[in-house]
């Protein structure tokens, strides 16, 4: 019986040792998963052919331009423009009395929201300049949305407003290039 107990104890100790040996290893793996932020957007339209207008002409684009976040993370939009050859952008109403000056306003809203009207673009925070300006809760925004922290796959409507110079010597058409840029959401 004593031998049997010794054998059982030995088997038991060996069994514990085998379990410990089976659980222990000299290497272990760690899986690191990384997704690189992708900032991307698409526009539903990239032109606004206003056509022939009079001085002091004012118009809001008749349809919104859908700006869709096609990246994989939240992003905020920035806007800037390039002045046409004959005109300069004005960022306040005070500058509109001068010849060869125009305004281009922009407002982001949630999709399927009614179009802003011309009087909604009276705040200098809505006028596009020649340097990038980031959207905020009040810049390029009204009460129904903005271009701040737009989630992946979401869209915002971008409405544009144009006010022609009070006078101009330019007889050829003028093209204003507006750039929409995505930056990491803030």
Image (cartoon, helix red, strand yellow):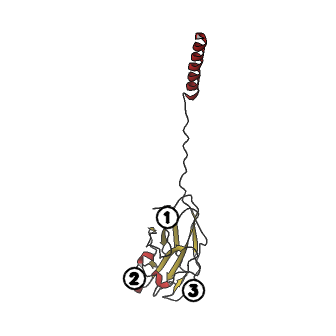
Residue 101 image offset from top left, x and y in percent: 44, 81
Q: Nearer the viewer, mark 1 or mark 3?
A: 1
- Badge 1 is on which residue? 149
Q: Is residue 66 above or below residue 13?
A: below
In which image quadrant can residue 26 be found? top right
Q: Earlier in the sequence, mark 1 or mark 2?
A: 2
Q: Residues within 10 Å of mark 3 (few under 14, many from 20)?
A: few
Q: Earlier in the sequence, mark 2 or mark 3?
A: 3
In the image, 139 versus 14, the foreground residue is 14
Q: Residue at x 50, y 75 (%)?
A: 144
Q: Residue at x 48, y 67 (%)?
A: 148
In which image quadrant can residue 186 be found? bottom left
In the image, 177 versus 94, the foreground residue is 94
In this orientation, does residue 19 appear?
Answer: yes
Q: Is residue 53 above or below residue 29?
A: below
- Badge 3 is on which residue? 52
Residue found at the far left of this picture: 94
Q: Secondary structure at mark 1?
A: loop
Q: Residues within 10 Å of mark 1 (few under 14, many from 20)?
A: some
Q: Secondary structure at mark 3?
A: loop
In which image quadrant can residue 126 be found? bottom left
- Badge 2 is on which residue? 95
Q: Residue at x 49, y 84 (%)?
A: 118
In the image, 74 versus 50, the foreground residue is 74
Determine contact: label 1, label 3, CB under 8 Å. Answer: no
Residue 13 image offset from top left, x and y in percent: 56, 19
Residue 137 image offset from top left, x and y in percent: 44, 71
């Amino acid at each position: 019986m004593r031998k049997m107990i010794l054998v059982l104890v030995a088997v038991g100790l060996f069994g514990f040792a085998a379990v410990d040996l089976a659980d222990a290893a000299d290497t272990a793996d760690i899986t690191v998963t990384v997704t690189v932020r992708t900032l991307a957007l698409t526009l539903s339209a990239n032109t606004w052919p206003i056509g022939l207008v009079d001085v002091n002409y004012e118009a809001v684009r008749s349809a919104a331009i859908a700006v869709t976040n096609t990246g994989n993370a939240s992003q905020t939009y920035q806007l800037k423009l390039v002045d046409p050859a004959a005109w300069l952008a004005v960022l306040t109403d005070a500058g509109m009395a001068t010849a060869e000056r125009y305004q281009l306003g922009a407002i982001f809203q949630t999709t399927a929201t009614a179009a802003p009207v011309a009087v909604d673009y009276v705040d200098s925070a809505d006028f596009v300049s020649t340097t990038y300006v980031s959207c905020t809760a009040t810049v390029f925004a009204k009460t129904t949305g903005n271009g701040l922290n737009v989630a992946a796959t979401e869209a915002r409507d971008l409405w544009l407003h144009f006010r022609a110079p009070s006078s101009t010597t330019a007889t050829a058409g003028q093209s204003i290039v507006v750039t929409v840029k995505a930056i990491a959401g803030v």
